[in-house]
Amino acid sequence: MSLQVLLTPPGGEPVEVTEYLTHGQLSLSRGLGGEGAGCSFSLTNYPGVVSLADVLVTWDGTPIYRGQVIRRKREALGDAVTRIAPECVDAVTRMRRRLVARIYEGQRADAILADLLTRYMPEVSRVIPDLPAVIDMAYNYVTLEEAVNRVAEATGADWSLLPDDTFRAFLETWDRDTVPVYDPTNILGDSFTDEVVNAQFANRVWVLGAKQAAESYKTQTFSGASNVFPLAYEPNYTEVRVNGGPLRKVHLKENRQADSEFLVDKRRKAVEALIALSASDTVEIRYRPTVEVVDYFEDPASVRTYGLYEMAIKDRKITDKTAARQRGRAAMRRSATQRPVFSWQTDGTWDVYPGQRVRVVWPQWGIDQFCRLTDVTIDFQWLGHRWRVVASLTGEGL
């Protein structure tokens, strides 16, 4: 089994630089979504071009990192030794270079994700779960990363762009063909720890979304004795009739026109008459109130056990109840119970990623639990005759 590191300088051909790795070392860190992956290494006495080179790291021919060098630092370690330390960004950077200008109205979240990737990143394959929430999304030249993040946030999903150019979205966790098991036979030495973190503990979650016009109309009736009519709510799609007659000319205060008969002041929640009225006139104002998408979820059993702990999610990109429910349920799943956080090291493992579901068994403490990987670091070390691979993993109990 072997590691291979390839650099492709701008306009050039791939060059293998594995033999130049300082002390034969390379480290990968892997994160979710826009956090992406990191690749840390340095090269000793490498004579080629490094700046802006594409980076491909493979293990037995399988891609385990794709990225680009955005900066390099060179230092002299004596007369005959030069060390170059590249700073790399991973393939998620491509998503920040592609701009999205589209509007989606009343579409399923999974369909929006699929369409975004088909249009703006067709070179990647996709694994997208059922995300049935019907949502609206308007993108005015935002990056593809931001566009994807908005859908993920609205549905409580996570995503990763894997080094084999697979975009994977998932709810809570995702599985390979088999679920890896980590126990005393493959956990290194004294590396296993078990921690309970309560900083984000909550058993009632409020979701506060966007402000928008209600679907139903409200009607208020006034006497013509006044020319200013205060409304109960901020109005939208305002209609005015006098004495049951035809609709009058109504415009926003900021858009007053020559034929305006009534002006709507949304900030003051009022309508002003520009025409003469008498006390005997009846003014009927019909409008759709501005409402905020609000929903909340709680875990009654947790409340009974621990008392009430509340948290609020404020996201103006949530525009409907379905999206609010998905976001709230996802937050509740992760915060309503005291979840253990396990950390350990294992030898020989490289094919693991954040979000993946694994099983942790530690009989000494009676632990046999599935968990969701949250942090992954893979260290490679050339020992002169073989590569040693050590994975440092952190998982959150499910």
Image: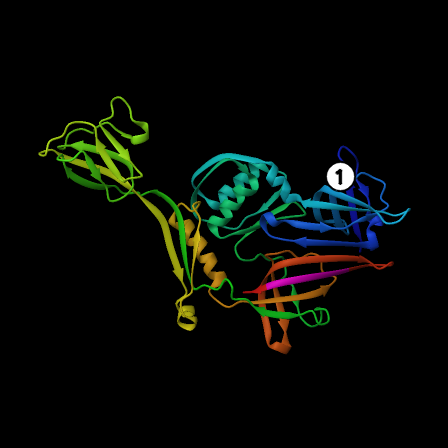
Q: Quadrant of the N terminus?
A: bottom right
Q: Which residue is mark 1?
A: 51
The span picked out in magenta is 389-395
Q: Label 1's element?
A: loop
**Residue at left 69%, top 62%?**
392
Residue 390, magenta (yes or no): yes
* Vertical comparison of 328 with 145: above or below: below
Confirm whether residue 131 shows in the render: no
Can I make out residue 305 in this image?
Answer: yes
Percent coordinates x, y for residue 171 in the rendering: 52, 55
Which image quarter: residue 203? Answer: bottom left
Give the amino acid at mark 1.
Answer: Ser
Q: Is 194 left, or right, of 12 in this rendering?
A: left
Q: Position of residue 87 (x, y in %)?
A: 72, 46
Check the picture and name the quadrant holding the C terminus. Answer: bottom right
Residue lying farthest to the left in this orientation: 280
Residue nearest the viewer, comparing 207 with 125? 207
Q: Say which residue appears at 22% left-offset and 33% top-offset.
A: 272
Magenta span: chief secondary structure: strand
For this rendering, which residue is in front, 296 or 184? 296
Q: Residue at x 83, y 55 (%)?
A: 23
Q: Quadrant of residue 15?
A: top right
Q: Please name the colour scheme applied to the rendered image.
A: rainbow
Residue at the farthest top position: 258
